[in-house]
Amino acid sequence: MFDLADANNFYASCETVFRPDLRGRPIVVVSNNDGCVIARSAEAKRMGIKMAAPLFQNERFFRENGVHVFSSNYELYGDMSARMMAILGEMAAGQEVYSIDESFLDVTGIGSLIPLESFGQQMRARIRQETGLIIGVGFGPTKTLAKLANHAAKKWTKTNGVVDLSERSRQRKLLQLTDVSDVWGIGRRISVRMNQLGITTALQLADSNVSMIRKNFDVITERTARGGKAQGTGRPLPAHQRLYRHGPVRGRAAVLELRIVHLRLSDE
Protein backbone atom coordinates (compact mmCIF):
# COMPACT_ATOMS: atom_id res chain seq x y z
CA MET A 1 0.00 0.00 0.00
CA PHE A 2 1.35 3.40 -0.98
CA ASP A 3 0.78 6.88 0.38
CA LEU A 4 1.44 10.08 -1.53
CA ALA A 5 1.80 13.19 0.61
CA ASP A 6 1.86 16.43 -1.34
CA ALA A 7 2.02 20.01 -0.04
CA ASN A 8 -0.74 22.32 -1.25
CA ASN A 9 0.52 25.15 -3.48
CA PHE A 10 3.98 24.61 -2.04
CA TYR A 11 5.94 27.74 -3.01
CA ALA A 12 3.05 30.06 -2.14
CA SER A 13 2.40 28.17 1.10
CA CYS A 14 6.05 28.54 2.15
CA GLU A 15 5.69 32.31 1.81
CA THR A 16 2.56 32.44 3.98
CA VAL A 17 4.27 30.45 6.75
CA PHE A 18 6.27 33.62 7.41
CA ARG A 19 3.45 35.97 6.41
CA PRO A 20 0.42 34.43 8.15
CA ASP A 21 -1.47 37.70 7.61
CA LEU A 22 -1.66 36.73 3.92
CA ARG A 23 -3.38 33.38 4.43
CA GLY A 24 -6.56 33.32 2.40
CA ARG A 25 -5.27 36.10 0.14
CA PRO A 26 -4.23 35.73 -3.53
CA ILE A 27 -0.48 35.15 -3.81
CA VAL A 28 1.79 34.47 -6.76
CA VAL A 29 5.47 33.57 -6.82
CA VAL A 30 7.47 34.74 -9.81
CA SER A 31 10.72 33.40 -11.24
CA ASN A 32 13.99 34.72 -9.86
CA ASN A 33 14.27 37.40 -12.53
CA ASP A 34 10.64 38.39 -11.84
CA GLY A 35 9.79 37.17 -15.33
CA CYS A 36 6.73 34.94 -14.97
CA VAL A 37 4.42 33.25 -12.49
CA ILE A 38 5.70 29.87 -11.32
CA ALA A 39 3.35 29.28 -8.37
CA ARG A 40 -0.10 30.44 -7.22
CA SER A 41 -2.15 30.19 -4.08
CA ALA A 42 -5.60 28.63 -4.34
CA GLU A 43 -7.11 32.12 -4.22
CA ALA A 44 -4.94 33.26 -7.14
CA LYS A 45 -5.94 30.19 -9.15
CA ARG A 46 -9.62 31.01 -8.61
CA MET A 47 -8.97 34.48 -10.03
CA GLY A 48 -7.89 32.84 -13.28
CA ILE A 49 -4.19 33.66 -12.99
CA LYS A 50 -2.27 31.25 -15.20
CA MET A 51 1.06 29.55 -14.74
CA ALA A 52 3.84 31.25 -16.74
CA ALA A 53 1.85 34.50 -16.91
CA PRO A 54 4.39 37.30 -17.56
CA LEU A 55 4.68 39.68 -14.64
CA PHE A 56 5.01 42.80 -16.77
CA GLN A 57 1.70 42.06 -18.48
CA ASN A 58 -0.15 41.50 -15.21
CA GLU A 59 1.31 43.97 -12.74
CA ARG A 60 -1.65 46.34 -13.02
CA PHE A 61 -4.16 43.49 -12.58
CA PHE A 62 -2.26 42.21 -9.55
CA ARG A 63 -2.11 45.68 -8.00
CA GLU A 64 -5.79 46.48 -8.59
CA ASN A 65 -6.97 43.09 -7.29
CA GLY A 66 -4.79 42.84 -4.20
CA VAL A 67 -2.59 40.03 -5.49
CA HIS A 68 0.62 39.78 -3.45
CA VAL A 69 3.73 39.05 -5.51
CA PHE A 70 6.81 37.27 -4.13
CA SER A 71 10.12 36.77 -5.87
CA SER A 72 11.15 33.13 -5.71
CA ASN A 73 13.24 32.11 -2.71
CA TYR A 74 14.67 28.69 -3.47
CA GLU A 75 16.74 28.42 -0.30
CA LEU A 76 13.56 28.84 1.73
CA TYR A 77 11.67 26.27 -0.35
CA GLY A 78 14.54 23.78 -0.11
CA ASP A 79 14.70 24.16 3.68
CA MET A 80 10.92 23.80 4.09
CA SER A 81 10.98 20.74 1.85
CA ALA A 82 13.76 19.13 3.88
CA ARG A 83 11.79 19.64 7.10
CA MET A 84 8.61 18.22 5.56
CA MET A 85 10.36 15.19 4.07
CA ALA A 86 12.20 14.42 7.31
CA ILE A 87 8.91 14.34 9.24
CA LEU A 88 7.22 12.11 6.66
CA GLY A 89 10.22 9.79 6.65
CA GLU A 90 9.85 9.34 10.41
CA MET A 91 6.20 8.33 10.07
CA ALA A 92 6.49 5.50 7.54
CA ALA A 93 9.13 3.32 5.92
CA GLY A 94 10.27 3.18 2.32
CA GLN A 95 10.21 6.89 1.56
CA GLU A 96 10.62 7.92 -2.06
CA VAL A 97 10.88 11.67 -2.52
CA TYR A 98 9.26 12.37 -5.87
CA SER A 99 9.78 16.14 -6.05
CA ILE A 100 10.37 19.10 -3.79
CA ASP A 101 6.83 18.88 -2.36
CA GLU A 102 5.79 15.23 -2.96
CA SER A 103 6.79 12.01 -1.28
CA PHE A 104 5.65 8.42 -1.67
CA LEU A 105 5.67 6.28 1.47
CA ASP A 106 5.27 2.53 1.90
CA VAL A 107 2.44 2.18 4.42
CA THR A 108 2.00 -1.57 4.08
CA GLY A 109 0.65 -3.01 7.34
CA ILE A 110 -0.24 0.32 8.92
CA GLY A 111 -3.90 -0.17 7.98
CA SER A 112 -4.07 -3.18 10.30
CA LEU A 113 -3.10 -0.98 13.25
CA ILE A 114 -5.00 2.21 12.53
CA PRO A 115 -7.49 3.27 9.82
CA LEU A 116 -5.51 4.84 7.00
CA GLU A 117 -7.72 7.93 6.98
CA SER A 118 -6.88 8.48 10.66
CA PHE A 119 -3.19 7.97 9.92
CA GLY A 120 -3.44 10.48 7.09
CA GLN A 121 -4.97 13.04 9.43
CA GLN A 122 -2.12 12.44 11.88
CA MET A 123 0.34 13.16 9.08
CA ARG A 124 -1.48 16.36 8.15
CA ALA A 125 -1.62 17.52 11.77
CA ARG A 126 2.06 16.93 12.42
CA ILE A 127 3.22 18.60 9.20
CA ARG A 128 1.06 21.62 9.90
CA GLN A 129 2.14 21.86 13.54
CA GLU A 130 5.86 21.53 12.84
CA THR A 131 6.18 23.38 9.51
CA GLY A 132 3.01 25.41 9.00
CA LEU A 133 2.38 23.63 5.67
CA ILE A 134 -0.86 21.94 4.65
CA ILE A 135 -0.61 18.63 2.80
CA GLY A 136 -2.98 16.36 0.94
CA VAL A 137 -2.69 12.62 1.57
CA GLY A 138 -3.76 9.82 -0.75
CA PHE A 139 -3.58 6.07 -0.16
CA GLY A 140 -3.73 3.39 -2.86
CA PRO A 141 -2.43 -0.09 -3.70
CA THR A 142 -0.41 1.38 -6.58
CA LYS A 143 1.43 4.67 -6.98
CA THR A 144 -0.97 5.64 -9.76
CA LEU A 145 -3.96 5.15 -7.46
CA ALA A 146 -2.20 6.88 -4.56
CA LYS A 147 -1.57 9.84 -6.87
CA LEU A 148 -5.22 9.84 -7.91
CA ALA A 149 -6.33 9.67 -4.27
CA ASN A 150 -4.08 12.61 -3.44
CA HIS A 151 -5.56 14.60 -6.33
CA ALA A 152 -9.06 13.95 -4.98
CA ALA A 153 -7.99 14.83 -1.42
CA LYS A 154 -6.84 18.24 -2.59
CA LYS A 155 -9.71 18.84 -5.01
CA TRP A 156 -12.71 18.04 -2.80
CA THR A 157 -12.90 19.77 0.59
CA LYS A 158 -15.33 17.16 1.96
CA THR A 159 -12.44 14.69 2.09
CA ASN A 160 -10.69 16.81 4.75
CA GLY A 161 -7.48 16.36 2.83
CA VAL A 162 -7.27 12.55 2.99
CA VAL A 163 -8.57 9.88 0.58
CA ASP A 164 -8.12 6.12 1.07
CA LEU A 165 -8.51 3.95 -2.03
CA SER A 166 -7.89 0.62 -0.32
CA GLU A 167 -11.31 -0.67 -1.35
CA ARG A 168 -11.86 -1.57 -4.99
CA SER A 169 -15.36 -0.06 -5.03
CA ARG A 170 -13.93 3.31 -4.02
CA GLN A 171 -11.20 2.99 -6.63
CA ARG A 172 -13.69 2.43 -9.43
CA LYS A 173 -16.00 5.21 -8.26
CA LEU A 174 -13.18 7.75 -8.30
CA LEU A 175 -11.79 6.44 -11.58
CA GLN A 176 -15.22 6.93 -13.15
CA LEU A 177 -15.29 10.56 -11.95
CA THR A 178 -11.79 11.32 -13.24
CA ASP A 179 -11.10 12.54 -16.77
CA VAL A 180 -8.37 10.50 -18.42
CA SER A 181 -6.34 13.68 -18.95
CA ASP A 182 -6.06 14.01 -15.15
CA VAL A 183 -4.39 10.60 -14.76
CA TRP A 184 -0.76 10.79 -13.67
CA GLY A 185 1.44 10.70 -16.74
CA ILE A 186 -1.32 11.03 -19.34
CA GLY A 187 -1.87 14.76 -19.77
CA ARG A 188 -3.52 16.61 -22.61
CA ARG A 189 -1.59 15.37 -25.61
CA ILE A 190 -1.96 11.65 -24.91
CA SER A 191 -5.56 12.09 -23.75
CA VAL A 192 -6.53 13.49 -27.16
CA ARG A 193 -5.38 10.27 -28.80
CA MET A 194 -7.13 8.22 -26.12
CA ASN A 195 -10.37 10.10 -26.68
CA GLN A 196 -10.17 9.08 -30.34
CA LEU A 197 -10.04 5.45 -29.13
CA GLY A 198 -13.12 5.98 -26.96
CA ILE A 199 -11.20 6.33 -23.68
CA THR A 200 -12.40 9.44 -21.89
CA THR A 201 -12.34 8.47 -18.20
CA ALA A 202 -9.72 6.95 -15.93
CA LEU A 203 -11.99 3.95 -15.41
CA GLN A 204 -12.11 3.27 -19.15
CA LEU A 205 -8.32 3.39 -19.18
CA ALA A 206 -8.11 0.99 -16.24
CA ASP A 207 -10.54 -1.40 -17.96
CA SER A 208 -8.79 -1.19 -21.33
CA ASN A 209 -6.73 -3.95 -22.92
CA VAL A 210 -3.16 -3.24 -21.86
CA SER A 211 -1.78 -4.78 -25.05
CA MET A 212 -3.84 -2.30 -27.07
CA ILE A 213 -2.53 0.55 -24.92
CA ARG A 214 1.06 -0.54 -25.47
CA LYS A 215 0.51 -0.95 -29.21
CA ASN A 216 -0.96 2.55 -29.60
CA PHE A 217 1.21 4.35 -27.04
CA ASP A 218 4.26 3.03 -25.16
CA VAL A 219 5.32 0.85 -22.26
CA ILE A 220 5.17 3.79 -19.83
CA THR A 221 1.52 4.44 -20.66
CA GLU A 222 0.87 0.70 -20.36
CA ARG A 223 2.32 0.76 -16.84
CA THR A 224 0.06 3.68 -16.01
CA ALA A 225 -2.94 1.66 -17.17
CA ARG A 226 -1.80 -1.29 -15.05
CA GLY A 227 -1.48 1.08 -12.10
CA GLY A 228 -5.14 2.00 -12.50
CA LYS A 229 -5.99 -1.71 -12.40
CA ALA A 230 -4.16 -2.03 -9.06
CA GLN A 231 -1.53 -4.18 -10.80
CA GLY A 232 2.15 -3.43 -10.28
CA THR A 233 3.15 -0.07 -8.86
CA GLY A 234 2.06 2.20 -11.68
CA ARG A 235 4.02 4.92 -13.43
CA PRO A 236 7.76 4.83 -12.67
CA LEU A 237 9.77 7.93 -11.81
CA PRO A 238 10.92 9.88 -14.89
CA ALA A 239 14.69 10.23 -15.02
CA HIS A 240 14.64 13.97 -14.30
CA GLN A 241 12.70 13.36 -11.09
CA ARG A 242 14.95 10.67 -9.59
CA LEU A 243 17.32 13.21 -8.03
CA TYR A 244 16.11 12.82 -4.45
CA ARG A 245 14.51 9.40 -4.21
CA HIS A 246 16.17 8.26 -1.01
CA GLY A 247 16.28 11.29 1.24
CA PRO A 248 15.04 14.81 1.96
CA VAL A 249 15.44 17.49 -0.70
CA ARG A 250 18.26 19.74 0.45
CA GLY A 251 20.63 22.47 -0.68
CA ARG A 252 20.33 23.23 -4.37
CA ALA A 253 17.29 20.99 -4.73
CA ALA A 254 14.95 23.96 -5.01
CA VAL A 255 17.01 25.45 -7.81
CA LEU A 256 16.92 22.18 -9.71
CA GLU A 257 13.20 21.92 -8.99
CA LEU A 258 12.67 25.04 -11.12
CA ARG A 259 13.70 22.99 -14.13
CA ILE A 260 10.98 20.49 -13.24
CA VAL A 261 8.48 23.34 -12.92
CA HIS A 262 9.25 24.49 -16.44
CA LEU A 263 8.88 20.92 -17.72
CA ARG A 264 5.42 20.84 -16.16
CA LEU A 265 4.21 24.21 -17.47
CA SER A 266 2.98 22.80 -20.77
CA ASP A 267 0.61 20.49 -18.89
CA GLU A 268 -0.79 23.09 -16.46
Image (cartoon, grey):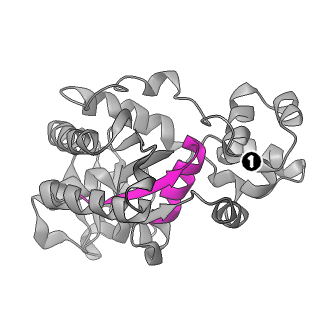
Outermost residue toward the front? 112
Quadrant in which residue 176 is drawn: bottom right
> The residue under label 1 is which amino acid type?
Ser
Inspect the magenta stretch and tell me whether residue 53 lies in it: no
Residue 58 vertical placement versus 234 (above, below): below
Front residue of 60 and 107: 107
Query: Seen in the image, is 45 located left or right of residue 14?
Result: right
Quadrant in which residue 254 is drawn: top left
Question: Where is mark 1, residue-wise?
Answer: 191
Residue 216 vertical placement versus 136 (above, below): above
Residue 216 vertical placement versus 18 (above, below): above
Q: Residue at x 35, y 71 (%)?
A: 43
Q: Residue 35: percent from the left, percent from the top?
A: 32, 43
Q: Residue at x 45, y 58 (%)?
A: 50
Query: Seen in the image, is 131 located left or right of residue 214?
Result: left
At numbered mark 1, what does the secondary structure look like: helix, strand or loop?
A: helix
Query: Seen in the image, is 192 located left or right of residue 108?
Result: right
Q: Which residues are magenta?
A: 133-154
- Answer yes or no: is residue 176 visible: yes
Query: Seen in the image, is 172 located left or right of residue 249?
Result: right
Q: Residue 52: percent from the left, percent from the top?
A: 43, 48
Q: Residue at x 37, y 22 (%)?
A: 243
